[in-house]
Amino acid sequence: MAVGVFDSGLGGLTVHAAIAARLPALPLVYFGDNAHTPYGVRDAEDIFQLTCKGVERLWEEGCDLVILACNTASAAALKRMQETWIPADKRVLGVFVPLIEALTERQWGDNTPPREVAVKHVALFATPATVSSRAFQRELAFRAIGVDVEAQPCGGVVDAIEQGDEILAEAMVRSHVEALRRRMPKPEAAILGCTHYPLMQHVFQDALGPDVKVYSQANLVAESLADYLERRPEFLGPGMVSKFLTTGDPKSVSSHATQFLRRGITFEAA
Ligand code: DGL
């Protein structure tokens, strides 16, 4: 009954942790494509090929349902995967839809036509590839009308976090918030559209001020997965064993992961 969690590297561990807390009995197989991280600066074709390869590996582990924890993969590859590549007995779900459902105050899985919503000015912080895909705006337009989205490509933040350089990451977050504010002085809500940004959530909130509601994905994704599995239990795959797989060097990825999440995690070769 395992579910797969795919990410370009370590960032998806924030989503994995939230799913594990929400659904403690569910076996989870994590796949980190550390050999090819970061995805945020790659082109869409490259991201599509790499994501399909990782998802196939999770299917081999008996995970019929895979969550793309990576925003960049969700934004740049998921639509094409769903339209051209995923067989009928498998599911691949991204991280944008649960976030947008929360932002637009919809029930999980509500596919009724778009309508006016309370929030009108939304700031999106994400990787350059996610921003240039415009996937967030596309998904939002299916559900809400009259919402102005200003997107800020946050180059450098993922690298600084991966290197454990919190001072640099904080300085970069503050300068990206300032850049966005020059174009949208008063956002009502801010979306942290990258797996790594929850680790800097306090800095985003501080730089944006207390009036801006900051949406972070991990808990929303976990909640919507729990709801999805209740509605579609047939997508609980045959896998029974939880594990962490990486395309990188398992020893060094394990030690980075332990530092990243501040608890022991052991990866094995994918
Ligand atoms: N996991 C990616 C995301 O959420 C961030 C890291 C990367 O650029 O690969 O967009």
Image: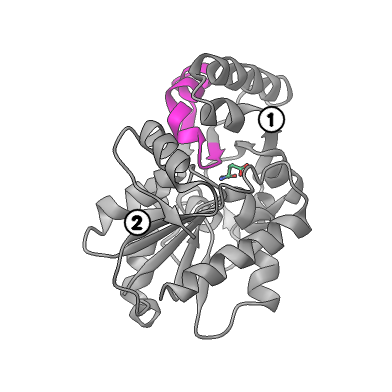
Q: Are marks 1 and 2 in contact (CB under 8 Å)?
A: no
Q: x and y percent of residue 99 in the render?
A: 49, 50
The crowd level at tag 2 (other Cα within 10 Å; few <14, some 14-19, many 20+) is some
Q: Based on the displayed image, in which of its 4 quarters is residue 65 positioned? A: bottom left
> Vertically, is 67 above or below 187?
below
Q: Along the line of sight, which residue is nearer the eye, 253 or 77?
A: 253
Where is mark 2, residue-wise? 223
Along the line of sight, the residue nearer the viewer: 210 or 245? 245
User: Above or below — where is 248 with respect to 252?
Assistant: below
Figure coloring: one colour
- Residue 155's disc is 1
Q: Position of residue 103 (x, y in %)?
A: 49, 47
Q: Residue at x 46, y 42 (%)?
A: 253
User: Is 188 inside the magenta-drawn segment?
Assistant: no
Seen in the picture, residue 173 relative to 69 is either above or below; the reply is above
- Looking at the picture, how far across and down is residue 48, in whole percent? 70, 62
Based on the picture, tell me whether residue 198 belongs to the magenta stretch: yes
Q: What amino acid type is highlighted by mark number 1?
A: Gly
Q: Tell me which residue sits at (36%, 36%) in the image.
A: 258
Numbered label attached to residue 261: none
Q: Residue at x 58, y 83 (%)?
A: 87
Distance CA(mark 1)–CA(mark 2): 29 Å
Task: Report the amino acid beneath label 2.
Answer: Glu
Task: Determine which quarter of the picture holds residue 88.
Answer: bottom right
Indicate the quadrant where residue 125 lies: top right
Residue range highlighted in magenta: 191-214
- Specify whether 238 is left or right of 206: left
